[in-house]
Amino acid sequence: MAAALVMNNIQISSGIFRMTVQSGMGGRPGQFYMLRSKNASPLLSRPISIFNVEEDRVQFLYQVVGEGTKRLAGLRPGDEIGIEGPLGNGFPEPSGQMAFVGGGIGIAPFYYALKQWPGADIYLGFSREAYLVQEFERLSSRVIVDVGGFITDRIDLSSYDQVWVCGPQPMMLAMQRLNASSGNTGKVYVSMENRMACGIGACLVCSIRTSGGRRKSCADGPIFPVEEVVFE
């Protein structure tokens, strides 16, 4: 695991932080890094999606949910952070009319995706409080936001050739059912951001059930065609 410098680490909403790290390792939308506070040696690294890439820096959007992310939130500019990546397969090459659907912290991969494919529509769902909506609106002319409802109710899959989805599993299960019931002919991909310990396929903590047997979210994914995933 390499060491990098934290450039900034800003709280943008309740429990939501955006961290910029000096790194030239880049990455693609849907890939992730394993991050670890250098002051948290007993703790495992945490998998965090790429939010943005700019020349010699990578940005991450993350939610504080446990001790590991709490320690990440305590990092200040100039602190060292352990960083490994980019990891995972990332979303496939886009084609045709695109839509990105993010729920909660699952909006993270789609900022960088929109920078590369600004013609895509973006759907943002939040349970209580919306955040970063204006940043997404600067990149896309069609941003659909839902707070407290079900963002999956707002999308007509037949309008798109590809749909990329990231968020809580109930939301992605809803998308799977919608995809099956609508007879959609486009492709829908989901990001299975499970808990993981190593990020490289050695520990099997992140394995998921698929129609082809158990697969590793880190090394085989985290992106899978929605129809292949067996949600548990």
Image (cartoon, helix red, strand yellow):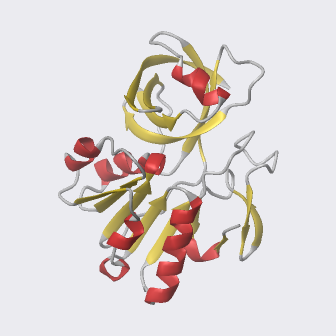
**Front-most of 35 and 16?**
16
Q: Which residue extends farthest right?
A: 203
Question: Quadrant of residue 46 in the image?
Answer: top right
Question: Quadrant of residue 67 in the image?
Answer: top right
Q: For the point 41% across and 69% down, which residue is it?
A: 152
Q: Position of residue 214 (x, y in %)?
A: 78, 66
Report the number of numbered marks: 0
Q: Position of residue 230 (x, y in %)?
A: 68, 72
**Front-most of 184 and 175?**
175
In the rendered view, would you say 136 is above or below 67?
below
Q: For the point 48% across and 41% down, which residue is it?
A: 50
Q: Could one spot residue 133 in this view of the protein?
A: yes
**Front-most of 138 and 63?**
63
Left or right, residue 81 beside residue 144: right
Q: Could one spot residue 28 in this view of the protein?
A: no
Q: Position of residue 220 (x, y in %)?
A: 68, 58
Left or right, residue 132 beside residue 221: left
Q: Position of residue 76 (x, y in %)?
A: 48, 13
Q: For the point 50% across and 51% down, which residue is it?
A: 30
- Image quarter of the N terminus: top right
**Front-most of 36 and 151?**
151
In the rendered view, would you say 72 is above or below 125?
above
Q: For the point 58% across and 37% down, which residue is it?
A: 33
- Image quarter of the C terminus: bottom right
Left or right, residue 215 beside residue 181: right
In the rendered view, would you say 15 is above or below 153?
above
